[in-house]
Amino acid sequence: MKYYTSFAILIICLISQVSFAQQKVWLDADTGNEMDDLYAIAHLVKSEKIDLIGISSAHFNNADLNVFEKWNAYDAATLKPVEESQRLNEEILEAMGRTDIPHPLGADRQIGRAWGQQDPRDSPAAQAIIAAAREMKGAEKLDVLTLGAMTNIATALMLAPDIKDKIRLYSLGSWYTPETKAWNKSEFNIRCDLNAFDYLLNLQGLDFTIMTTTTSFALKFDRDETYAALDESVAIQKILADRWRIHNPQDKTRVMWDLALVEAYLYPEWATVSTVMTPPENAPRSVKIFSEIDAAAMKKEFWRIIKE
């Protein structure tokens, strides 16, 4: 009798462990580009809903860096985009006491060349994503969220095709008009690595969900409300306030593009997912998009989480 009782307890414990295993998530962010990345990262790091196993830095190389003196508050001539993203990732993790989260450096430019091609752009980030995906056991998946150019995840999949079935990809980028089913790739993240986006769209069998900028446009923060809500005696909250104050002080409101993706991922009840066809110039297959979000609920939840 004791044997059967002990065996039953063991089975219950094992089932409990499986049931409460948290989803493993990897975040790839062009943190140095704007300000919303920092808000998205802070929320994801604080979330108890997932197991954040890595944060990698993404570049935001773009043509303006070659022809204008300034990019946001940066001097374009001396700016090294992926290094700035890396610096901020490290600053955020240190402020939040989470430097235990791996945070490798990503690629410094797009895959291929300006006229196309799809040669991978290897980096510590791509290798770390490959290693993390290969750690997944059985039906386990690694959810990868990208907030900028998709160079690192595209490279990882090019270098290690065996990880495709172990990854679910969630990315921010492109415009999409539901009424006409028309895609528009003339969007910042896509322009920073169109080759990577096309590769991922063409990759048959990849579980790919896209937060379009059309949808994320609904999530906006007010500058003065944000300043008033942030407690600058708390390190991460001061970083968030300073980011807006230094980089976008003239903007009374900002669209929180990246935060929309993070919250749609964390709270699927506040997001509608639709299945759509890839653009006509890409391989014909189905991908998913977040077609609608509850921006009010997301905004309220951000402040609840960040103030905890």
Image (cartoon, grey):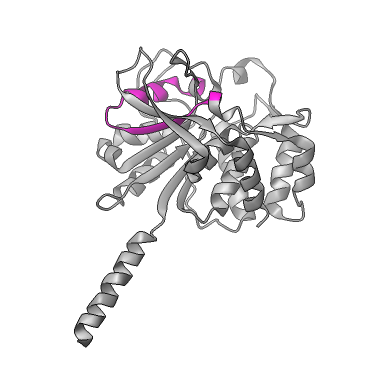
Magenta highlight on residue 206: yes
Is residue 56 visible in the rendered image? The answer is: no
From what the image shows, is residue 86 above or below residue 247?
Answer: below
Residue drawn at x 32%, y 23% as measured from the top left: 202
- The stretch in magenta equals 191-214
Return the x and y of residue 287 as percentages of the image width and height. 36, 27
> Furthest residue to the bottom?
2
Left or right: 243 as drawn, with respect to 184: right
Count how many numbered circles sit on residues in the image: 0
Left or right: 192 as drawn, with respect to 286: right
Q: Nearer the viewer, residue 276 or 194?
A: 276
Residue 95 location, quadrant: bottom right
Q: Quadrant of the N terminus?
A: bottom left
Q: Quadrant of the C terminus?
A: bottom right
Return the x and y of residue 260 as percentages of the image width and height. 56, 36
Left or right: 76 as drawn, with respect to 163: right
From what the image shows, is residue 102 above or below residue 5?
Answer: above
Q: Nearer the viewer, residue 98 or 19?
A: 19
Left or right: 67 as drawn, with respect to 212: right
Return the x and y of residue 32 as percentages of the image width and height. 61, 35
Residue drawn at x 70%, y 54% as measured from the top left: 235
Residue 72 location, quadrant: top right
Return the x and y of residue 199 as percentages of the image width and height. 35, 24
Q: Nearer the viewer, residue 115 or 36?
A: 36
Residue drawn at x 44%, y 45% as measured from the top left: 26
Magenta highlight on residue 185: no
Q: Nearer the viewer, residue 178 or 154?
A: 178
Is residue 174 visible in the rendered image? The answer is: yes
From what the image shows, is residue 301 above or below residue 182?
Answer: below
